[in-house]
Amino acid sequence: MSNLSIQGLWKTFEGHAVLRGVDLSVKSGALLALLGPSGSGKTTLLRTVCGFERADSGTIAIDDRRVAGEGMHMRPEARRVGYVSQEGSLFPHLSVAENIVFGLPYARRRTRDRVAELLELVGLPASYAARPPQALSGGQQQRVALARALAPSPRIVMLDEPFSSLDAALRAETRQAVAAALAHAGATAVLVTHDQSEALSMGHEVAVLWNGRMIQTAVPDELYRRPVTRELASFIGEAV
Ligand code: ADP
C-alpha cells in the first residue's frame, strides 16, 4: 500500500481551532494508532484525511501525491482511502456479500471469489456471504465493514474507534481479527482510539493528539516508558 504524510494541518470550527498544525507520517504497511483524550481532534483529523472535511491550511499527501493543500481539495472518492466507522454502518437490506461489493465499479462486483477472499481475510466463513448483517455479532459486522473498506484496494485504511461499540469479550477477539487482516493485506492503516491499551497493543507506532497538537509519535514501548508530558504519563497510566 501507500504512505501518508501530513504537514502543518489546521482545521477550525466556528472560531475554535481543533487541529493546530498537525504533522504526521505513516509508513507503507504500518498500523499507526492515533491516541488522545476525547475531544482532542482525532476524528476531525481522520475525516480531513478522508476528504469529508476541508483543511484550512497544511498539506496531506499519499505516496507523495498531494490530496489536499494550498487551495486543492481532492474529492473523497478519488483519494482511495478506506474508512471504517464506529458502528460499521452496514446496509441492513443487503446481504454481507452485497455490502462488501457496494460501491465497486459494476465490472468488479460479480466476483464471488473476491468476496470469499475478503471474508477469509477478516476471518469469517465464506458461507456468511448470503446472510443479512443482523445475523452476525457486532464484532463480525465490524469485520465485514473492514472487508468492505478493503474491497476497492484502497491506498490507506482509516478506522475510527472500530471496537468501541463492542463488549469486552468481543472486543479482544475482533481486535485480533482486524490486526491479522490488516497485516495480511499489508495495509497502511490509522486506527483512532481513546483507549490507551488498545493503542499500545495494536499500533506499530502510536501518535498522541492532545488539544489539536501532535505531542508525541513513538513506538509503543518508547511511549510507555518515556511519555513527553506529565498529563500524558498519567493518561497512559490509567490503562495499567
Ligand atoms: P475526538 O475524536 O478526539 O474526540 P473530535 O475531532 O471529534 O475529537 O472533536 C474535536 C473538537 O471539534 C470537539 O470540541 C468537537 O466539538 C469539535 N467539532 C468536531 N466536528 C465539528 C463540527 N462539524 N462543527 C463544530 N465543531 C466540531
Image: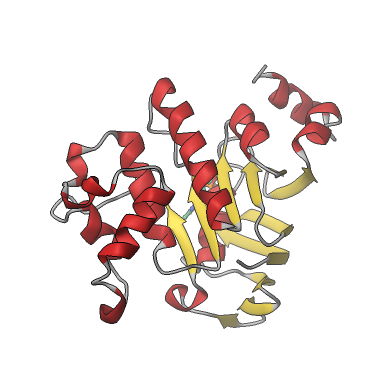
Instruction: Tell me the quarter of the picture where residue 13 sits.
Output: bottom right
User: Horizontally, is 5 left or right of 198 in the view?
Assistant: right
Up-down relation of residue 181 to residue 99 (above or below): above
Residue 41 or residue 158, whichever sits in front: 158
| Rendered image coloring scheme | secondary structure
Residue 52 or residue 201, whichever sits in front: 201
Say if residue 87 shows up in the picture: no
Quarter of the picture containing the C terminus is top right
Say if residue 213 shows up in the picture: yes
User: Horizontally, is 149 left or right of 43 in the view?
Assistant: left
Residue 112 or residue 219, whichever sits in front: 112
Residue at the far top: name it.
Answer: 240
Image position, residue 131 (x, y; %): 16, 47
Residue positioned 38% across, 49% down in the render? 120
Image position, residue 68 (x, y; %): 61, 76
Image position, residue 169 (x, y; %): 41, 21
Residue positioned 31% across, 42% down in the render? 141
Up-down relation of residue 174 to residue 116 (above or below): above
Image position, residue 1 (x, y; %): 60, 66
Residue positioned 32% across, 73% down in the render? 104
Residue at the far left: name it.
Answer: 93
Up-down relation of residue 168 to residue 125 (above or below): above
